[in-house]
Image (tube, rainbow, N blue to C red):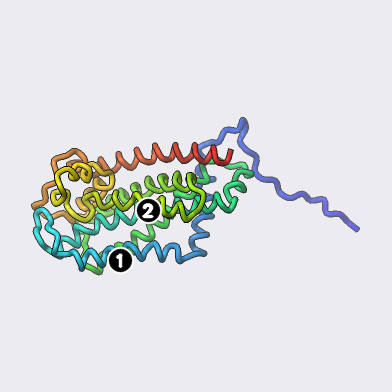
Amino acid sequence: MSIDTRRAPSPPPAPAGGRITLRQNLRDSLVVAKRNLLRMLRIPETVVFGLIQPIMFVVLFAYVFGGSISIPGAGLSASAYREFLMGGIFAQTVTFATAGAAAGIAEDMQKGIIDRFRSLPMARGAVLTGRTFADLAQTAVILVVLAVVAFLVGWRIHDGPLSALAAFGLLLLLGYAFTWIGALIGLSVRTPEAATSGGLVWLFPLTFISVAFVPSENMPGWLQPVAEWNPFSATVLAVRDLFGNLPPDYRAPDVWPMQHPALASVLWSVLIIAIFRTLAVRKYQRATG
């Protein structure tokens, strides 16, 4: 009787001195992202349900409120409102990915998958970064489908493909920033259900107290500065401008984020990433330490 003396392949060794290089961090993050993308493909209803809400918002706002809300520079015009609306719907859709990120991380924590990752020689922050990369890819797919639906209800791009790509880039950057908020929420609660609620409850006032669905000029005077300095508003106005969806006579409010929306959008997104990625990684290290 022969005995098989072959040994199972050992995991790759950790870097000398315990240091994780940027290259390894990125490689580990992409491996985790692939794992999460494969999981999403095996559960397609996750993407389908993620599409239903923004499509409902497009149809309801375009045909229920279209023509009843005055747009500066265009007045009461259903076609102008539909184009004005889409920047807000796009931005709302990418930020609502926060709830999915929060629920996914909370579920991994609850099932003990995070504990399995701890036993591997990998960068700790890669677990969170990989999750946010996967959520970003899912958000990009949803944006493409939503753009097709918007085109069917009358939305158009007027300023060329390069400006449109810049607009979608700003939207994805904002969505990526908000997934880090979702990551922190997912690490801070005990169940996926709580993470979903925690990821959504604050998004509704953030998106509605903004210039997403109505101009700030139509709001009470005390609420206008809140809407105009809202990070969400800067991205909404920037993508409207890049898509060419603002009326020719539109005049932005005389505050810095509304006068320089593209720059404000980038700065807000980078600031959110810097703050919440740091907080989320620290929370993760405490939770798994």
Query: Among all residues in the image, which is located at the extreme top?
Result: 17
Tag in front: 2 or 1: 2
Question: Element type at marker 2?
Answer: helix
Q: What residue type is labelled 1?
A: Met
Q: How crowded is mark 1: few (under 14 residues within 10 Å), some or many (20 or more)?
A: few
Tell me the residue that label 2 is attached to. 200
Q: Horizontal and vertical percent for residue 39?
A: 52, 59
Figure quadrant of the C terminus: top right
**Residue at the spot 14% in from the left edge and 60% down from the top edge:** 69
Left or right, 208 with respect to 74, comes to right
Q: Where is residue 207 in the image (x, y as percent from the top left)?
A: 28, 51
Cα separation between marks 2 and 1 = 17 Å
Indicate the quadrant containing the N terminus: top left, top right, bottom left or bottom right. Answer: bottom right
Q: Which amino acid does label 2 sit on?
A: Leu
Location of residue 152 with respect to 234 vertically, above or below: below
Q: Label 1 belongs to which residue?
A: 56
Mark toward the start of the polypeptide (2 vs 1):
1
* Residue 138's disc number: none
Within 10 Å of the Cα at label 2, are there few (<14), some (14-19), or many (20+) other Cα atoms?
some
Instruction: Mark yes or no: residue 33 visible.
Output: no
Residue 282 or residue 270, whichever sits in front: 282
Position of 12 relative to 53 (above/below): above
